[in-house]
Image: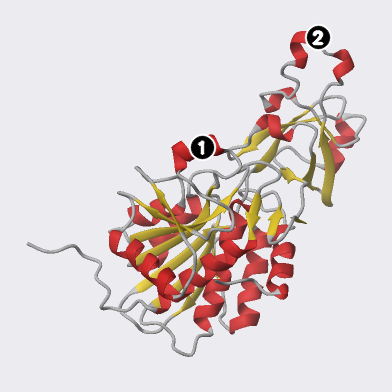
Amino acid sequence: MADFTRKQIDALAEFAAIPSPSGAEAEGALWLGRRIKEATGVQPYIDVHGNLHAVVDRGAKRTVLIEGHCDEIGFIVQWIDDDGFLYLSAVGGVTVPAVASERITIEGRSGRVNGVMGVRPPHLLSAKERDSVAPKELSSIACDIGASSREEAESLVSVGALAVVDAGYRPLAGSRVSCRGFDNRIGAFAMCEAFIDIANSPCGTGCNVHFAATVQEETGLVGGQTVAFDANPDIGICCDVTFASDATKQDRKLVGDLRLGAGPVIACGPAYHRGLSARLRETAEASAIPYQVRACARASGNNGWAMRLQRGGAATAVVAVPLRYMHSPVEVIDLRDAANAAALVASAVKSLDDSFPLLPEQP
């Protein structure tokens, strides 16, 4: 059982405050890179796409890629009307009714610009309209930044500016916290901490270790594909979030019984390497790290799939942090699950070497 230290929790809160919609991950990637450099002495780099890389080259034959995407869902300014209202399009899988009446923060010409997603007052709605007060399309919601004309609005923001809901990190009871964008900045943070552990470990590992915080997963696994091609790993471990079904029990028939605080989730199914998934389970049991298992009949939409399909493909596994209310402004996690995900991946990677069997039995 692992727990984040107070310093790690404070660092996570700082990282989570950084807006990182797909296409604007630079500030978050830079933050992670500086953390790694300060903690390990390893010099990270950011590639042309914006992916952050950090590598411990042991001179081994095999390379392990541990990865978490650092982007979050958000919005892009599509149009500004004559009265200064902004109309937005979704960047990633936005649940539109959940953002009605939310505050948002937008890339401005001279810094962040505040806005609100206004909705009509109930007094002006017909009885039929009250049954669906939250609009189902973003084009039905005007974003109000306080401007009184198109000219004033355009002096503050431009068409193409990216935005996120302004719902910050908030501690809840016990070890649970809420924030927008834990999908998947919590996975990127957990793998950053795992890499720091591995890089500073006196026992080292029998593999080269490549950490990546990737971009634009929410818009098509973009960074996951380019990083996997570049790193060309033999083994890939993706850390993302997965659906906690404890708050919405009907979802257990869809994803299984997955609970906050019960440990990270190891995926199993046709898309994942059986031996690697088994090694993760063995490591968890040997290290007294709690874990859960999710059966996946097909590949889920994360970068584990991207790793598997690049070049000759890697042996892949997914370790996920259970999360409530995915793709909403109030995503909830248990910090112990993230800490245990970092501990599990670090321990498993340190146990890998050239003797770990990747190929099936040969004819």
Residue beneath disc 2: 126
Q: What residue is rendered at 76% in x and 21% in y?
A: 133
Asked which colour scheme the image uses, the reply is: secondary structure
Q: Earlier in the sequence, mark 2 or mark 1?
A: 2
Q: Is residue 10 above or below residue 42?
A: above
Q: What residue is rendered at 63% in x and 36% in y?
A: 94
The amino acid beneath tag 2 is Ser
Q: Find the residue positioned furthest to the left.
A: 363
Q: What residue is rendered at 61% in x and 46% in y?
A: 324
Where residue 291 appears, as percent x and y from the top left, is 47, 61
Where residue 194 appears, as percent x and y from the top left, is 53, 72
The one of 10 and 68 positioned closer to us in this rendering: 10
Neighbourhood count class around disc 2 (C-alpha, 10 Å): few under 14, some 14–19, many 20 upward: few
Across the whole image, how many numbered discs are drawn on residues?
2
Is 23 placed left or right of 79 in the picture? left
Between tags 2 and 1, which lies in front?
1
Q: Secondary structure at mark 1?
A: helix
Q: What residue is rendered at 90% in x and 34% in y?
A: 147
Where residue 327 appears, as percent x and y from the top left, is 62, 42
Q: Is residue 243 above or below residue 14?
A: above
The amino acid beneath tag 1 is Asp
Residue 203 visible in the snapshot? yes
Q: Is residue 69 above or below residue 39?
A: above
Is 54 placed left or right of 147 in the picture? left
The one of 277 and 17 positioned closer to us in this rendering: 277
Displayed quadrant of residue 88: top right
Residue 232 visible in the snapshot? no
Where residue 284 appears, as percent x and y from the top left, is 43, 69
Residue beneath disc 1: 251
Q: Is residue 276 above or below residue 36?
A: above
